[in-house]
Amino acid sequence: MTAITVRSVSKYFPKSGRIGLRGVLRGLPASDRFTAISRISLQVPKGEVVGVLGRNGAGKSTLLRVVGGVYSPDEGGVALSGAVAGLFELGGLGNTQLSGREFAHRYLQIFGVERARRAQLVEEINDFSELGAYFDERIRTYSAGMAARLYFAAATAVPHEIYLIDETLSVGDEHFQTKSWARMRERLAGGASGLLVTHDWSAVIKLCRESKVLEAGRVVREGRSDVVVAAYLDLPRPTAKRARLLDPPPEALRGHSGRDCSIVLDVEVDEDIDVQVAVSLEALQLGVGWEPVVLTEFADAGRGPGLFRVELNIPTLPLAPGEYSLGLFLSTAADPTTGEREVLDARAWTYGDGLIFTVTGSASGGIAPFPVQWHEEEQE
């Protein structure tokens, strides 16, 4: 059940810009080649999108073009299972003497859409791209953004089984980006798979459960997207010098759908200060990102020094079975004048140390936010 398989793929380019007959016949010698990507392997399960993060020059676009067949790999191989739409090189539309309408017709024809259906789809592309009268003008008169909108509208007009995406969803203004995300959510909900390469970590969080990080053409990190993105961001963590959250027991990280649930937290305070805690539970919604299903206000956890236990009570846990990201936040009480508070300690996916809360049971719950109750007590 794999949509994309990349097996130990490498791609080289000549340093001089010229290959020559010997290079064509025997391959580029190591001294005269630049390694764009080196021995990359990955798999994209059907119905999933895998993200590839990396800064400029990391090799992301080269990888996508090898997967899409624009470049042939010099080593390794690629296997695709399904019809592919390549959402990259936006604006690189070939013959710019075509009008937007002519391009849309040609694109649909290439992908085998019957003539009887083509006219309706062309009008849908016109409507989605929001080009107005420019749809019947030549593409050479378009701005880069207009050309990109035309290409995105055409490439997603007909559902495909695999999407290869490179920085596409940042096209246009906020309104058009919202439309683009909505369309991609619709396609993914229909069972499509994809490979997203980008430097935009928020796009990876929105679309991908699993991700990789490329540096200098090599995979340097891979795993769950929240963990990978946290390492990519490398945010400074709270020091936990004055007070800290202790690791919760395993039973505090589990709940059963439809039953009362308690999340127990132990807090250690070293100084004479009031401390407060807050909790978040987030669910990954493809196309949206991590959506909070529980986001509490800060609640009193005690006044130090000492060891304290606080309990978050959730009556009749209304969550569907699955894994949720659990975030814990410890701070001083808010300043009564400014409202500011000092963050003392935290566990969250953005810091790379978030916890996983597992819900078991039947699939009767949802992901809508719901009320919770706090209970506090001092430990001996």
Image: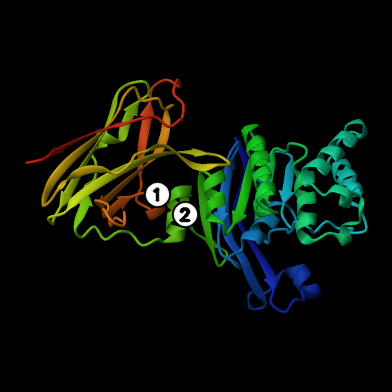
Instruction: Write down the residue under mark 2.
Output: 229
| Depth order, front residue of 287/73 | 287
Number of numbered discs present? 2
| Depth order, front residue of 210/337 | 337
Mark 1: give few (<14), some (14-19) or many (20+) Cα within 10 Å. Answer: many
* Above-or-below relation of 239 to 295: below
- Considering the image in quadrants, where does the N terminus appear? top right
Q: What whole-number distance in Å separates the C-alpha atoms at marks 1 and 2?
A: 8 Å
Of the numbered discs in the image, which one, if any, rests on residue 223? none
The residue that appears at 73% across and 59% down in the rendered structure is 71
Give the quadrant of residue 317: top left
Instruction: Write down the residue under mark 1.
Output: 349
Sequence-wise first label, 1 or 2? 2
Instruction: Classify residue 256 as left or right of residue 13.
Output: left
x then y, percent, for residue 133: 89, 49
Residue type indicated by callout 1: Trp
Residue type indicated by callout 2: Val
Instruction: Classify residue 199 as left or right of residue 275.
Output: right
